[in-house]
Image (spheres, rainbow, N blue to C red):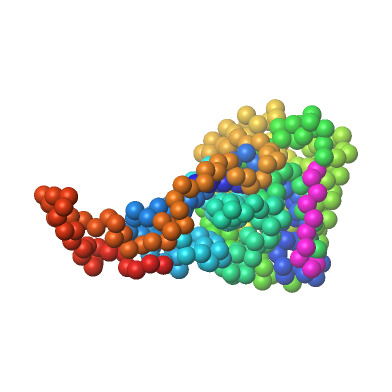
Amino acid sequence: MIISRTPYRISFFGGGTDFHTWYREHGGAVLSTSINHYCYLTCRFLPPFFKEKSRIVWSQVEKVMDNSEIVHPSVRAVLQYFSGDKGVEVNHTGDLPARAGLGSSSAFTVGLLNAMNGLHGRMSNKRELACEAVHIERDVLKENVGVQDQIATAYGGFNKITILQNGDFAVEPVILPQGRMQELQSHFLLFFTGVSRTSSEVAKEQVAAIGNKKVEMGMLRALVDEALDVVSYAKDLNEFGRLLHETWKVKRSLSASIAPQFVDEIYDRARTAGAIGGKLLGAGGGGFMLFFAPPERHPTIKKALQDLLWVPFAFESGGSSIIFYDPSAYSVDTYTRRDFYHLQERQPGAKPQDKVLPLAPKNRIMTML
């Protein structure tokens, strides 16, 4: 059995420049951090005592005889990517809701790849995990996704991620004195709007509009370096919040689906209560909202948004990791045998010397893999 733990992420600046329709021509950059809320995936080769070949437990419980039958798209794609014949059991649990702007889908894919590589006796480095996750989500599943989430959740940490035109990328940790980092963290408030959405669907309109929004996209890219200068050199951290507000205004101009009316109302309430700036996380449409304000204003903002769920968080730096590994005691032969002749049932009351009757065909798992 193996358990992976992969953090969710918060993207501050540069979101949208990580779509291939933009960075292939202009390059891209993102300023983001992973946070101390996680996606956990428990994986093992399914022991030979079950009728099904594989079992997948998420918001549904799937029991399948072939991995191509799996409903969960990422699980199906990852298991087919490994192209093994062994049955597996996958259990997922997460600290925060899915489809809410924190990179949960990519955290799931990265974590599953990490666990499955470990299950097959291979250690993955951060770059391999990120690249494999991009391949699964964008090339195999054909989702409208960028590349920042896979990189941020695989690597962990507070980083500037630079994406080159050829698709290569560099991850540069933001180095700050401990006191400065703590001061920055103390200014953030995270709230859940209660609305979940599929980011790929929301992002589809934005991706299509990128070609006509070159000025706005260029502004989003420039804000990455401005924000990095603020946290590194500026005396007044409140400038970070003002830059977030600039990002909010630019992002809203990209697509009407980014900020529905109820999101605008939440943002206005927070600003009225003392927030300097903020943003809707992820592709937009709902999910989590982040606000930046001096700590002394936080009680007033929480009161103004008391109908929402406030979620405390802190930055983390570990990225996707294996937190438990216990090699299986079953042999390869045990895992591949599916005929169960050694477990054939006896008739009720039969004595040990009595002849063993074969299982009815409808109750047998057919042949060997």
Query: Foreground residue, 103 or 210?
Result: 103
Whole-percent x and y of residue 185? 71, 35
Q: How many marks?
A: 0
**Relative side of 299 to 59, left or right:** right
Query: Is 359 rendered above or below residue 181?
Result: below
Q: Residue furthest left?
A: 349
**Relative side of 364 to 300, left or right:** left
Residue range in magenta is 165-174
Whole-percent x and y of residue 333? 43, 59
Query: Foreground residue, 153 or 183?
Result: 153
Query: Foreground residue, 343 or 203?
Result: 343
Residue at figure coordinates x 62%, y 39% from the top left: 36
Residue at figure coordinates x 88%, y 39% from the top left: 233
Q: Quadrant of the C terminus?
A: bottom left
**Relative side of 278 to 198, left or right:** right
Residue 172 included in the magenta stretch of the image: yes
Whole-percent x and y of residue 25? 80, 70
Q: Is residue 166 visible?
A: yes
Query: Is 135 rendered above or below residue 320?
Result: below
**Relative side of 111 to 164, left or right:** left
Whole-percent x and y of residue 270? 64, 40
